[in-house]
Amino acid sequence: MKSTQNLTLKQSQSLRITPQLQQAIKLLQLSNLEVAAYIETEMEKNPLLKIEDKVFEGNQLSVIEDKIDIENTDFNSYSVDNSKNIINEENNELKVFSSDQSFDNWYANGPNLDLQGDARPSELKQLNSLRDHLYTQLNVAFTDKSKLMIGRALIDSLDDGGYLSSTVDDISEHTGFNKSEILIVLEKCREFDPVGVFARDLADCFSLQLADRDRLDPVMQVFLKNLDLMLRYDISALQSVCMVDRNDIIDIIAELKLLNPKPGLVFQQEITEWAIPDIIVYPNKEGGWFIELNNECLPTVVVDKIYYDELSKNNLSNKDKRFMRENLQSANWLVKSLDQRSKTIVKVMTEVVKNQDEFFRFGVSHLKPLVLNDIARSIKVHESTVSRVTSNKYVMTPRGVFELKYFFTNSVSSVDPKKVHSSESVRTQIKELIDTETVSTILSDDRIVEILRLEGINIARRTVAKYRASLNIASSTQRRRKKLAQAEI
């Protein structure tokens, strides 16, 4: 058989991920704060990008922009005007269902996004750090340079709670000093304020504080060696090992409650990280819900065509012309990507509100099962697009701020085949049942199963145990011991 070579033409289609498409995909999964940082970086590189000014109306900060009615907007045909490039969408109205009249304050005032107001601490109490506080005491306690070096090494080995995170052997190896020298300095440092620092563990920390109060008697020492029994609220076992009666054990536990298990945290300045919402959902007075993007942390980006036209009138070199053309194309793509991101987020949130309307009106017990594919089919996009939209995004609602993924939960079967329950709502019901327990009404997992089945939820005991564990709730035996102990203390 003779082989030959032929030259043929073939037409085919293939999907290529262009840099512009990669940019659009990247922006879709970023939060508003991350998008704002990305825009700032792009503006440093591209002279044709600029931020559209925002205007003040009274005490409200607003953006000059178009309003879009979600219900009447054809997103597939929505065009982008590059002369304006408005990327933020506000007051996107969704006219579905009636609202809950309990949201009167939302009706009257709308969402309050003054995150710089009373919701945040006006100022942080200025305190020296734990290490600075201990360094000061160290310089008073010692004058010998070697002991000062050992003391600094010991202070540097403390964790935020004031506990030693390194052993004496480790410090000896690191500093080159003998263990006996280190132990001498350590014993002196254990007298420093706050009482309890330089402890090796919780029992040691309590021992230092009790010794300072002259309350470290033999019974207390035995008790501290068996703290694991206290954590399990096993009072009977503690009576046995301490050889005292029940009332004495209750008194010891009450005394330990007055101690500080992490004395170093007195100097810890904890700054709360606030979740800035990317989307806002609030009721409409006439019924339904308003859905809008949080424009306060997202700038409005436009292409500066006036600047481009002025530069184009000049006699530019071929290199400069190419540079300006590339920047114009890049700027247009960025603005289009941001515009598409905004519309996609609003479309996804619209469908979430349609599916979870009862949650917004009545609470978490009415949360319905929902998966990404349900939303993807409704708005005719790929499931991965919905996944990107729901990543790193928060929504502010009348019921609080939630991560967007919170609204997507698996289903739990029902006694009625026509009904299903959200796993999150079932988890909430389990927590509510346990929260209402008393000493005489502690619920076992089997009893919780029975109660839930009476409410139409078909659930297995092992599933109840799994949900309980995910909520960090102890077993019924441990809960009973704890309530009995608490009742006596």
Image: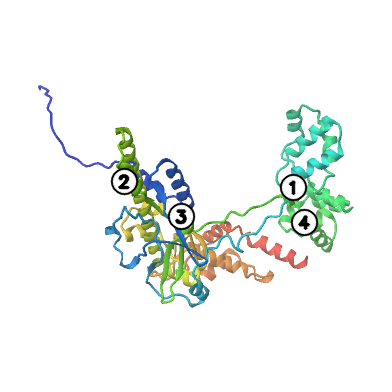
Q: Is residue 154 above or below residue 366?
A: above
Distance of label 2 from label 1 (alpha carbons): 57 Å
Q: In which quadrant of the rendered image does the N terminus lie?
A: top left
Q: Residues within 10 Å of mark 1 (few under 14, many from 20)?
A: few
For marks 2 and 1, the one nearer the N-term is 1
Distance of label 3 from label 1 (alpha carbons): 36 Å
Distance of label 1 from label 4 (alpha carbons): 43 Å
Q: Residues within 10 Å of mark 2 (few under 14, many from 20)?
A: few
The numbered mark at residue 309 is: 2
Q: Secondary structure at mark 2?
A: helix
For marks 3 and 1, the one nearer the N-term is 1
* Label 2 with label 3: CB-CB less than 8 Å: no
Q: Which residue is mark 3?
A: 298
Q: Amino acid at mark 1?
A: Asn
Q: Residues within 10 Å of mark 3 (few under 14, many from 20)?
A: some
For marks 2 and 3, the one nearer the N-term is 3
**Percent x, y for residue 415?**
44, 70
For marks 1 and 4, the one nearer the N-term is 1
Q: Residues within 10 Å of mark 4 (few under 14, many from 20)?
A: few
Q: Secondary structure at mark 1?
A: loop
Q: Which residue is mark 4?
A: 237
